[in-house]
Amino acid sequence: MSVSSSTILTESGTNELEIIEFHLVKQMPDGTTKTCYYGINVAKVREVIQVPETTDYPNAQPHMVGVFSSRDILTPLVDLAGWLGVPTSKDLTRKFVIVTDFNNMTNGFLIDSISRIHRISWNDVESPSQFLEAGEQDCVVAVVRKDGNLIMILDFEKIIADINPELSMEKYDVKLDKNVDLNQRMIAKRNAKTIMVVDDSAFIRSMIQDTLSSSGYNIIACKDGGEAHDKLMNLIEVAKQENIPVSELIDGVVTDVEMPRMDGMHLVKRLRDTDAYSSIPIVMFSSLMSEDNRAKALALGANDTITKPEIGRMVTLMDKYVFAKND
């Protein structure tokens, strides 16, 4: 199954996406089975294939089956069920592999079956409940209800970072980055500024927040575009009551693209259509930031974009736009 490159995600901020529904078949203690429903954004998927021949990799991380060649790219094959703690059949002859391509990385994920592609509105994508969203270690970023089933949208960035820590953004420490100005004068300037960070992954959100706050910025964190939009509209009312410009309350926004309720592209569009936020600095931080998607983000009004592994650019980019308006 080849997956064509989808443009729905970023079509003029339409707030729609396509997800691939796939399954893991859980082996129950009494010998019965239970189907578990999961999903992934089509934009992250290169293809779905039968299980290829793999080669063992020395000192591999747990749940890494081996490596294989995908279009001449050496690709790790991850036992997704093993990582999730879902006991499934060990027979690989009837399983499939989802080959993903995002964050400038190619990975394969072992699954039991592939179902279909759903086109849905982000309005119909629910944030996990407080029970499910347990914090940085949680791997479910959203839930979709389809045909009486709950489809769990997984945080594949979190899974990849856990399996291959060497590629994780967690290794970045802004305090060790010689490209970032960390003298007391600059930290004091940042202390007077507030940035909103919007990402549905608690894992990613925490890393962005830690990076910006370590450099001096104050942070308002939001778990999706809907929450961000609500808070930003509320700040307009607060500014009116205090008879001050809203720019004294918020100085910039860093937002993901894929999010429940309202995606990042739609959030940018809504903000640029609001007088109070028509010129607020907005940087989009996404694993799906291809050249095409970057062009669409800029056309909607984003000031700049960053691909998720490049968290080292975050502080200098925010400095560029947040302090430019004062120059």
Image: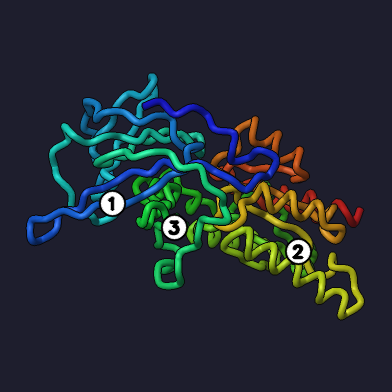
Image point 91% across, 53% down: which residue? 327
Query: Taking the image as drawn, is residue 60 in sight?
Result: no
Please tell me which of labels 1 and 2 falls first in the chain: 1
Q: Which of 98 and 9 lies nearest the eye of the viewer? A: 9
Q: Where is residue 17 in the image (x, y as percent from the top left)?
A: 54, 43
Type of amino acid at the residue the image marks with label 2: Arg
- Please indicate whether residue 220 sits to the left or right of residue 151 in the image: right
Alpha-carbon neighbours of circle 1 within 10 Å: few (<14), some, or many (≥20)? some
Assign a secondary structure to mark 1. helix
Image point 52% across, 29% down: which residue? 5
Reading the image, the residue beneath label 2 is: 190
Farthest residue, direction top? 72
In the image, residue 161 above or below residue 110: below
Assign a secondary structure to mark 2. helix
Farthest residue, direction bottom? 241
Farthest residue, direction left? 30
Image point 73% across, 60% down: which residue? 183
> What is the quadrant of residue 248 in the picture?
bottom right
Reading the image, the residue beneath label 1 is: 83
Mark 2–mark 3 distance (CA, rounded to whole Å)? 36 Å
In the image, residue 116 above or below residue 26: above
Q: Which of marks 1 and 2 is in front?
A: 1
> What is the quadrant of residue 225 in the picture?
bottom right
Reading the image, the residue beneath label 3 is: 143
